[in-house]
Image (tube, rainbow, N blue to C red):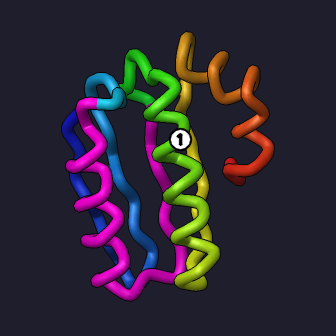
Amino acid sequence: MDYRINNQGGKAQVVFSGDITFSENVSFRQLLKDISEQNVDSCEFDLSAVDMVDSAGLGMFLIAREQADTAGWRLSVIGAQGHVASMLKLTKLSDLLDG
């Protein structure tokens, strides 16, 4: 998993690439810390370049949602395709992650 954060006026966008799996847990938690330190109002996860997400990756999205709710910023997910979109729909995470 690679990512870059673009922040413009309190609206952050995280553009991911690669796979989001258990092995990315530490990196993902650092990402959430970086977002929180930027005092954002909203954050959009762009998953259009993500090929695969496993159950741990889905769990990381739930952690991100909980952190967003706690910190008072809105989280949304866009661009999910193929396997990633199927996993989000199957687990109903697409309903929780405004898109």
Against 57, residue 66 (above or below) is: below
Label 1 crowd (10 A; few <14 / some 14-19 / many >=20): some
* Residue 48 is inside the magenta segment: no
- Can you say which quadrant of the picture contains the N terminus? top left
Could you tell me which residue is drawn at 21 percent across and 49 percent down?
A: 27
Position of 94 with respect to 56 (left or right) is right
**Prevailing SS of the magenta stretch:** helix
Among the 4 quarters of the image, the one containing residue 36: bottom left
Looking at this view, is 8 or 88 the one in front?
A: 88
- x and y percentages locating residue 82 in the rendered image: 56, 12
Residue 86 screen position, x and y as percent: 66, 16
On screen, residue 89 above or below 99: above
Q: Residue at x 54, y 35 (%)?
A: 58
Residue in view at x 46 percent, y 22 percent: 54
Which residues, given as a range, are shown in magenta? 23-47
Element assignment for label 1 = helix
